[in-house]
Amino acid sequence: MTSVLLTGASRGIGKAIKHLFLQRGMQVWAPSRQEMDLSDPDSISRYTASLTEGVDVLINCAGINELAGVEEMTDEQIEKSIQINLLAQMQLIRWVVPFMKHRGGGKIVNFASIWCSFSKPRRIIYSVAKAGVKGLTTAAAVELATDNILVNAVAPGFINTEMTSQNNSPAQIQALTRALPMKRLGQPDEVAELVWFLISDKNTFMTGQTLFIDGGFSCI
Ligand SMILES: NC(=O)c1ccc[n+]([C@@H]2O[C@H](COP(=O)([O-])OP(=O)(O)OC[C@H]3O[C@@H](n4cnc5c(N)ncnc54)[C@H](OP(=O)(O)O)[C@@H]3O)[C@@H](O)[C@H]2O)c1
């Protein structure tokens, strides 16, 4: 049975991934924030030490997007966001790679965002972190390719989760929906299906990519 470590599964996109993967017969380790707090590297080390056999697949889905402008962002906000959105992904990759090498390969999917390539006011910290995820994905894919470890990132657009409703008023969501080529928000299970393809046996040659799943947002 394929084993998966999935972060951010308590709600939103991660929850949809967990549901789909369990339906399709995967063994899913989906620690809550209480079990593995990604803002704390020691908590990450403690939790991963309990997975003594490693996993076949790592999905770095958890993320936060606390809005702050260029002149208002605090060091605390910057450090917290970079730790949860970027460094935790690096720390989990560093942990899982020896196991994957030992098993003869593996799959890693990181979560970036459309804001890794685009941005809007008060997204500076998030854009920096998610651009880092894109770089991390490219670099890890290149270094790990000969070990048969495929590393890709998913960059969602506006998906119907708490993150979107927290950071955009109903009027803003209505306006941005009207502006999207597909005229609707994405659903978490649509993103889960893309992640499924990336970690499935069907994906044998795609690595190092950051894939936009955004209803056409990045095309206009
Ligand atoms: N929704 C979108 O439109 C959108 C767009 C672009 C990119 N993304 C990215 O897609 C991923 C999933 O987003 P989402 O919309 O599903 O987010 P969400 O609904 O806000 O859920 C975030 C998840 O991350 C977990 N998390 C946050 N801080 C954590 C911490 N310190 N330790 C452990 N877990 C923590 C949350 O756990 P708790 O329940 O404990 O808080 C929750 O499970 C994120 O990386 C996000 O940046 C989302």
Image (cartoon, grey):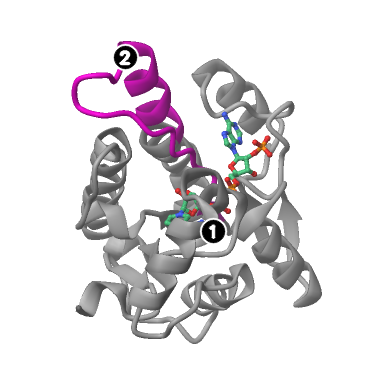
Residue drawn at the location 24% of the way across and 72% of the way down: 218
Q: Callout 1: helix, strand or loop?
A: helix
Left or right position of 105 against 210: right
Q: Can residue 151 be seen?
A: no
| Residue at x 44%, y 64% (from the top left corner) | 158
Q: Residue furthest top?
A: 75
Image coordinates of residue 201 in percent, x first then y, are 53, 82
Q: Quadrant of the C terminus?
A: bottom left
Please provide percent x and percent y for residue 64.
48, 38
- Foreground disc of the pair 1, 2: 2
| Mark 1 beta carbon near ligand 1 (under 8 Å) | no
Marks 1 and 2, the one that precedes in the sequence: 2
Q: Which residues are magenta?
A: 58-84
Quick check: which quadrant has ligand 1? top right
Disc 1 versus disc 2: distance between alpha carbons? 43 Å
For the image, the number of numbered tags is 2
In the image, which disc is placed on residue 103?
Answer: 1
| Residue 173 in the image, given as x and y percentages of width and height | 47, 62
Magenta span has 74? yes
> Which residue in the protein does label 2 denote?
74
Q: Establish if 146 lies above or below 77.
A: below
Residue beneath the point at 69% across and 38% down: 51
